[in-house]
């Protein structure tokens, strides 16, 4: 009986000591006053906290957004590339025009100086001072007969400019051809020039003095020959300078 009473006294002592210790513990006082979410104030123990699982993003919508962004980037790159190409084209075009216009004007002025009196040509057109413009005007009005005449006249102008002959009043077409043949001499490199001139003379005489009706095809054939004729004469002019 005495032992049971002793046990009761000891148990009561330890309970009182625990209460006093809890009351004197500063950490517990802070926890009880601050009440953090992870502390159970009533049970003086850890509190279970329910963790939130992050929501899973929809991969299809994310891929769709990335695809739209990539497409927009490619479109913008294409727009920039097209704009750059257009600007470069305009720059090149302006430079070409600026460079070519003075050359055309200079050439026309030189032709006008070489043939100041076009009445010396094999047909009377004394009021015309620019055979290139006269050819273009005749072609625009579908006057193929006059266009053929001016195309032939420009053959003679090219020769005059190169110093191969001089356009003079009274010189016949055959007279111009003899002058060119004399200039060629024995040079086989120049033999094509009189042949082209002879073809141009034949075409001119058939349509101007004869009864052969001129048309666009005849003019085009004559102009193709004149392009070759002009390049050969220009080459001879360069060699002589």
Image (cartoon, rainbow, N blue to C red):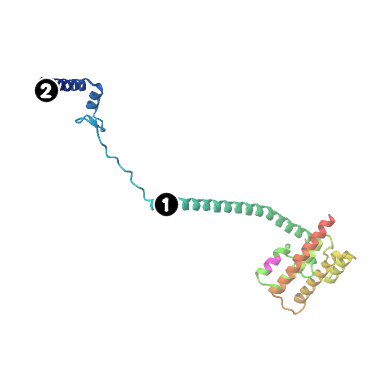
Q: How crowded is mark 1: few (under 14 residues within 10 Å), some or many (20 or more)?
A: few
47 or 160, which lies in front?
Answer: 47
Q: Quadrant of residue 111?
A: bottom right
88 or 158, which lies in front?
Answer: 88
Provide the residue designation for mark 1: 63
Q: In which quarter of the image is residue 235?
A: bottom right
Please state, as top left, top right, bottom left or bottom right, where the C terminus lies in the image.
bottom right
Secondary structure beneath disc 2?
Answer: helix
Q: Which span of residues is magenta-colored?
A: 134-138
Q: Does the magenta stretch include residue 106?
A: no
Q: Can residue 170 be seen in this view?
A: no
Q: Position of residue 85 (x, y in %)?
A: 58, 53
Q: Where is residue 71 in the image (x, y as percent from the top left)?
A: 47, 53
Secondary structure beneath disc 1?
Answer: helix
Please state, as top left, top right, bottom left or bottom right, where the N terminus lies in the image.
top left
Q: What is the spatial separation of the Cα atoms under label 2 and label 1, in whole angstroms?
A: 78 Å
Q: Can residue 88 be seen in this view?
A: yes
22 or 168, which lies in front?
Answer: 22
Direction from residue 64 to residue 216 in the image, left or right: right
Q: Residue 80 carries which label?
A: none
Whether residues under marks 2 and 1 lie with C-beta atoms below 8 angstroms apart, the answer is no
Q: Residue 4 carries which label?
A: 2
Depth check, mark 2 against mark 1: the one in front is: 2
Direction from residue 83 to residue 33 in the image, left or right: left
- The residue under the point 20% across, 31% down is 43
């Amino acid at each position: 009986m005495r032992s049971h009473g002793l046990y009761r006294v000891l148990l009561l002592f330890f309970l009182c000591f625990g209460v006093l210790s809890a009351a004197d513990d500063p950490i517990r006082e802070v926890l009880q006053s601050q009440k953090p979410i992870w502390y159970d104030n009533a049970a003086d123990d850890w509190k279970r906290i329910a963790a939130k699982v992050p929501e899973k993003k929809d991969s299809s919508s994310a891929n769709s957004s990335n695809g739209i962004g990539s497409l927009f980037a490619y479109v913008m790159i294409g727009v920039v590339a097209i704009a750059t190409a257009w600007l470069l084209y305009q720059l090149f075009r302006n430079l070409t025009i600026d460079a070519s216009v003075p050359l055309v004007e200079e050439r026309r002025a030189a032709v006008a100086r070489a043939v100041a009196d076009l009445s010396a040509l094999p047909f009377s057109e004394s009021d015309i001072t620019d055979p290139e413009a006269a050819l273009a005007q005749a072609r625009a009005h579908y006057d193929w007969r006059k266009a053929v005449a001016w195309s032939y006249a420009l053959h003679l102008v090219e020769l005059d400019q190169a110093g191969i002959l001089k356009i003079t009043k009274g010189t016949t077409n055959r007279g111009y051809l003899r002058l060119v043949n004399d200039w060629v001499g024995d040079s086989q490199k120049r033999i094509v020039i009189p042949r082209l001139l002879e073809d141009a003379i034949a075409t001119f005489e058939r349509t101007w003095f004869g009864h052969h009706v001129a048309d666009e095809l005849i003019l085009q054939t004559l102009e193709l020959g004149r392009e070759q004729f002009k390049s050969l004469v220009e080459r001879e002019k360069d060699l002589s300078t």
